[in-house]
């Protein structure tokens, strides 16, 4: 009888190769628009453009304006659907209808789309979807493969019966007719989010300029009377979620519950006290209690390009005779106080975060140190690396001859004195002083031209770096630096910005993916791959499996894979069962990496191990390109193999 315990053992040992514990990774997700490439919802009506008005029929010789802008004057229900169409307006050249559009359908999957509606009305359609069948309340369209790239889709409601008006329109992706209510999220999108620990809903909530379409609309009142009531929030039944109130909180909660991810919420700057209290209560009662809620008041309240900063300066500072930024602190404090009151018996469920600016330590300190003691749990600058204005000037001089390597050299030459220095100061002068964790509400590459929004002369290199291996390396190096800013007592959190968005030379290439259906074997996604590798493979991981039917009788060292590699590679090896011993017996094992000159570079394993199959991942981010050797030894067994690092 074999002298073995009949057991199955699975253990994971994590050892960080540079002595630092890795940071947690979350992500921001992209704002909802009719041209977005992120595609979160299977009901595409949620991402339709807001209603526009136009002539209900073509007028020969008329202006036939695309948007006559009479929508606000049409009587409508609480969800935005007109009670009757066509609509008469004295200044219009004929009766008016309403219409919407999806300006880009790049990421729409091919197949059969279902258009559903309640009520009695007539529609006209145009664009890339081809009508197949029609019956009251239901129209079927087909979208052929290969025409999405230059396609669009729009429809117009030309008639809506006043006794049973058109409402509750849905446009459902292929294969979702039976499931769209229970699973409103696009599976391809949902699955790509599963690796992230926290989801930040700043853009989903339209936090910047919230409740207004432009920043200058946010402070056009003379008194502090424009607080928004809870009833004015975005609601599930609203016809679209591309409005300036964003996505309903119920959808954010549902996503986090389904993903089992923590939630980072940005409270609107002009929300009334009752709004904030109702929001906190909604989260408390509906989010899985095992999940954390990160609470932040608005977003970048120090950033003068946003309406919330202008609003806070007018009402919190100028109108009250207070200095900026001290005058905005009471608004942040009030938000945190209300959440604290609602969660008073479950404070471990919330993390109250005060947002600050990475490059402006004085402003950060004047905000944070004016908050009431113990009223918040963390502070958060952004964690970007970027091109300085000086670097931009040099690259502009190089013009179209600029290479990816030129950009990388500029970033690396300045990052230590700029971004690294700024964040180190924030840690030393705020985190260490207050003994609070420093989180990062946004972060990643911020490689944009100066001034922002203008086309640079080195545009092609700006596009190319987003797909280059150098970007992968920059991200890995950045994460290693950020690890040094946390302590075991005050762990950090990095919130990637952002998830999916197309490349842009003028406005920044924020997405770690360019589109939802991006084939990364054809179109590289180094930012996305770096984050996934860091989340899942950053630590050295050893897995042991053994049972009665899996007795290891020989030592074995496999060839690493991939090989060549950059910067991660996996090494598998087997430890022999010691004859006459039981399963609990161990043997001393060493796995060491040497360079081509025989110098020891890394010790991956140096311990007693039980018989079984092992797998270990080595991160060579700090090593130079070249040939390396890895050697497994145990007792009299010794085997060496070669591997190649190519950066």
Image (cartoon, rainbow, N blue to C red):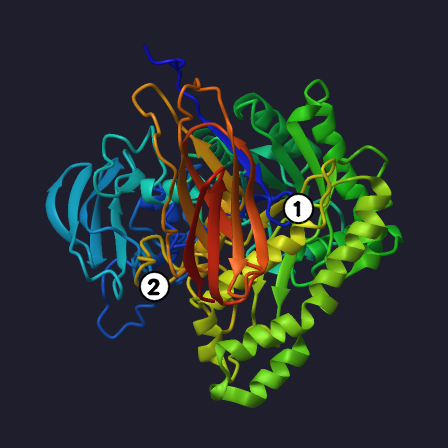
Label 2 crowd (10 A; few <14 / some 14-19 / many >=20): few
SS at mark 2? loop
Residue, disc 2: 523
Q: Residue furthest front?
A: 636
Q: Is residue 327 visible to us here? A: no
User: In the rendered view, does 318 fall on the left or right side of 149?
Assistant: right
The spot of residue 79 in percent (x, y) is 42, 38
Left or right of 96, for residue 321: right
The x, y position of residue 465, in whole percent, is 47, 71
Residue at 83% x, 45% y is: 432
Q: Are marks 2 and 1 in contact (CB under 8 Å)?
A: no
Please name the residue shown 43% across and 22% down the image.
9
Instruction: Characterize the local packing of mark 1: few (<14), some (14-19) or many (20 or more) Cα atoms within 10 angstroms.
Output: few
Name the residue beneath numbered marker 1: 19
Residue sitting at 65 percent across and 63 percent down?
A: 305
* Element at label 1: loop
Q: Where's residue 93, x and y in %?
A: 32, 65
Furthest-top residue in view? 1
Q: Residue 128, percent across and down?
A: 20, 59
């Amino acid at each position: 009888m074999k002298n073995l315990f009949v057991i199955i053992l699975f253990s994971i040992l994590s050892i960080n190769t540079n002595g630092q514990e890795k940071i947690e990774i979350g992500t921001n997700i992209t704002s909802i628009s009719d041209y977005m490439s992120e595609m979160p919802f299977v009901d595409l009506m949620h991402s339709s453009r807001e209603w526009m008005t136009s002539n209900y029929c073509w007028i020969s010789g008329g202006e036939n304006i695309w948007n006559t802008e009479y929508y606000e004057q049409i009587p409508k229900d609480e969800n935005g659907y007109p009670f009757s169409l066509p609509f008469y307006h004295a200044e219009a050249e004929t009766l008016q209808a309403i219409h919407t559009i999806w300006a880009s359908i790049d990421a729409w999957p091919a197949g059969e789309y279902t258009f559903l509606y309640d009520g009695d009305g007539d529609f006209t359609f145009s664009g890339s979807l081809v009508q197949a069948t029609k019956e009251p309340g239901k129209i079927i369209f087909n979208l052929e493969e290969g025409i999405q790239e230059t396609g669009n889709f729009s429809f117009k409601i030309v008639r809506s019966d006043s006794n049973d008006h058109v409402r509750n329109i849905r446009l459902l992706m292929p294969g979702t007719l039976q499931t769209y209510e229970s699973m409103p999220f696009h599976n391809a999108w949902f699955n790509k989010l599963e690796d992230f620990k926290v989801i930040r809903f700043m853009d989903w909530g339209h936090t910047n300029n919230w409740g207004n379409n432009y920043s200058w609309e946010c402070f056009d009142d003379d008194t502090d009377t424009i607080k928004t009531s809870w009833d004015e929030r975005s609601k599930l039944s609203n016809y679209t979620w591309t409005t300036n109130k964003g996505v309903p909180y119920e959808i954010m909660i549902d996503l986090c519950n389904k993903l089992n991810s923590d939630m980072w919420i940005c409270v609107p700057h002009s929300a009334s006290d009752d709004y904030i209290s109702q929001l906190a209560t909604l989260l408390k009662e509906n989010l899985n209690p095992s999940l954390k809620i990160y609470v932040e008041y608005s977003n970048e309240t120090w950033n003068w390009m946003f309406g919330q900063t202008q609003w806070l300066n007018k009402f919190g500072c100028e109108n009250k005779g207070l200095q900026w930024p001290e005058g905005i602190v009471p608004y942040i404090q009030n938000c945190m106080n209300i959440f604290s009151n609602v969660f008073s018996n479950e404070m471990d469920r919330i993390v109250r975060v005060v947002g600050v600016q990475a490059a402006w330590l004085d402003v950060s300190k004047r905000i944070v140190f004016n908050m009431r003691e113990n009223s918040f749990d963390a502070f958060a600058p952004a964690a970007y690396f970027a091109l300085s204005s000086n670097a931009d000037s040099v690259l502009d001089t190089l013009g179209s001859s600029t290479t990816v390597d030129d950009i990388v050299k500029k970033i690396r030459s300045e990052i230590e004195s700029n971004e690294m220095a700024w964040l180190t100061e924030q840690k030393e002068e705020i985190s260490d002083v207050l003994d609070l964790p420093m989180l990062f509400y946004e972060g990643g590459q911020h490689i944009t031209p100066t001034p922002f929004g203008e086309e640079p002369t080195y545009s092609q290199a700006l596009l190319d770096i987003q797909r280059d291996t150098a970007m992968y390396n920059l991200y890995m190096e950045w994460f290693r630096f950020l690890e040094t800013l946390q302590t075991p007592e005050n762990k950090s959190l990095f919130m990637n910005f952002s998830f999916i968005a197309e490349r842009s030379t003028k406005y920044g290439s924020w997405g770690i993916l360019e589109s939802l259906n991006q084939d990364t074997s054809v179109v590289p996604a180094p930012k996305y791959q770096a984050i996934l590798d860091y989340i899942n493979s950053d630590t050295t991981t050893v897995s042991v499996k053994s049972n009665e039917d899996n007795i290891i009788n020989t030592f074995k060292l496999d060839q690493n894979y991939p090989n060549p590699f950059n910067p991660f590679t996996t090494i598998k090896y087997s430890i022999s069962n010691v004859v006459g011993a039981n399963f609990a017996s161990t043997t001393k094992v060493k796995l060491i990496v040497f360079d081509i000159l025989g110098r020891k570079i890394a010790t991956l394993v140096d311990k007693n191990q039980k018989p079984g199959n092992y797998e270990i991942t080595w991160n060579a981010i700090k090593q130079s390109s070249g040939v390396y050797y890895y050697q497994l030894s145990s007792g009299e067994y010794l085997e060496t193999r070669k591997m190649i690092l190519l950066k």
